[in-house]
Image (cartoon, rainbow, N blue to C red):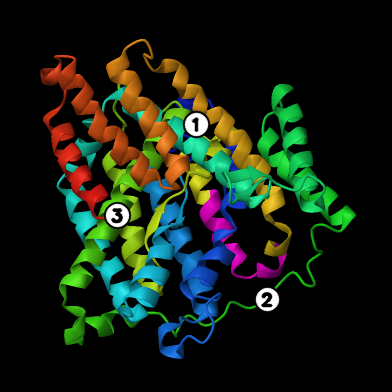
Amino acid sequence: MKKYFMFDELGTNYRREFLGGFTTFLAMAYILVVNPLTLTLADVKDLPDALRMDYGAVFVATAVSAAIGCFIMGLLAKYPLALAPGLGLNAFFAYTVVLVNGSPWQHALAAVFISGVFFLLLTLTGLREKLINAIPMELKLAVGAGIGLFIAFIGMQNAKIIVNNDATLVGIGNLRDPQVLLAIFGIIVTVILMVRGIKGGVFYGMVITSIVGMITGQVGLPEKVFSAPPSISPTFGALFSAFSDPSFYTLSMLSVILTFLFVDFFDNAGTLMAVANQAGLVKDNRLPRAGKALISDSIATIVGSVFGTSTITSYVESSSGVAAGARSGFASIVTGCLFLLALFISPLLGVITSAVTAPALIIVGVLMVASLGQIAWNRFEIAVPSFLTMIMMPLTYSIATGIAVGFIFYPLTMIIKGKAKEVNPIMYVFAVIFLLYLATL
């Protein structure tokens, strides 16, 4: 086992991998609650039952598809990268495709299925890996830093340290709010542990914050530990009914499929590059086994759509596991097992609140922006696209949009500098595609 996962080569051990996998799970366990709420459009009143998915079935589909994605990633690609239904894409699925367009959720699942099949074909031909390797190192580093800022912003927003402000868009939250104070406490504890060089400081910070939250009454005690998983039958295989429905074959649905395909590709690519770079797995601007890593999310998306959930994608929260010591695919196996276990201990998920996970996301954001030091900021043709890639992610609340803006400016500034021949031809193709993408937003 140790040899297969290259423990000696990566300088890791079972304890660090288990701790890393456990930390990643805790950091992303919120998806087990958020995804069902999103896909069932729980906040939309007076919605016809035909447009509303079954909550219990989506919960099971979320856990099972995440577990399968983690297992494939860990065993095949051997990366400490966890997968689950992607935030943003699930909102597009529910609020745009189903609620606004009025498409049956079975049609939306079919669109996810088709996009997953296309992903797999692109990966098997090696095209996806070539596309990733064509991206210059400076932009890969900027993507990592941008994702760091993005998830730190998400953490602060979830903890309500940063809130909406009508005058300035964002502003400081109510620092007297007990939940906000608990999150701040968690940040301080985690910072102390990290500064002291304690391995797994991010994980221990979450544990301490949870305990203090329960003691102070800010985190509820679970009423019970075990419960049987809900039935998967309402959503399992439901997508296949769309293929016999003539109304599925429209230009509108083609646009939906392409959106799933496009956004998922660059969200996955950006996350994969960022987490792998943080873990020190990028060699000479190339990512070993990138093809296998991309196959993992393709297969997971196909399986997830069959079970009844939206697109599966790599999670930036995996960086919290890397910060806790994870370096190999064994950590992903641990995370996958915990997702399966979550099917039976869902009442315990109540202790994993935003105040508990926010400190981990914020600290990981600090760690991820360290890559900025490797960017040649004294070269303006590099500084401009790198900065725009980084800053646009939190400002637009979209990894894909940040990548789009940076990838458009990179060939532009290189041409102006007279270094057009140094740009990989694929980057010019990316620039054109991203221009078209932004024009459709």
Which residue position is annotated with label 1? Answer: 7
Q: Residue at x 56, y 34 (%)?
A: 365
Amino acid on which disc 1 is placed: Phe
Ranked by sequence position, the earlier of labels 2 and 3 is 2
Q: Residue at x 39, y 44 (%)?
A: 399
In the displayed structure, would residue 286 be above or below residue 58?
A: above
Place of residue 321 in the rendered image (x, y in percent of width and height, measured from the top left): 57, 40
Q: Say which element carries label 3.
A: loop
**Residue 339 lies in the magenta-colored region:** yes
Q: Say which element carries label 2.
A: loop
The Cα atoms of the two marked residues, 1 and 3, are separated by 45 Å
As drawn, is 215 to the left or to the right of 132? right
Question: Badge 2: how crowded within 10 Å, few (<14), some, or many (20+)?
Answer: few
Foreground mark, 1 or 3? 3
Residue at the right extreme? 215
Quarter containing the C terminus? bottom left
Q: Residue at x 80, y 51 (%)?
A: 177
Which residue position is annotated with label 3? Answer: 441
In the displayed structure, would residue 396 be above or below residue 91?
A: above
Which residue position is annotated with label 2? Answer: 227
Magenta residues, start to end: 334-348
As drawn, is 23 to the left or to the right of 263? right
Ranked by sequence position, the earlier of labels 2 and 1 is 1
Amino acid on which disc 2 is placed: Ser
**Residue 340 lies in the magenta-colored region:** yes
Place of residue 92 in the rendered image (x, y in percent of width and height, measured from the top left): 38, 64
Residue at the top extreme? 378
Marks 1/3 in contact by CB < 8 Å: the verdict is: no
- Magenta segment's dominant SS is helix
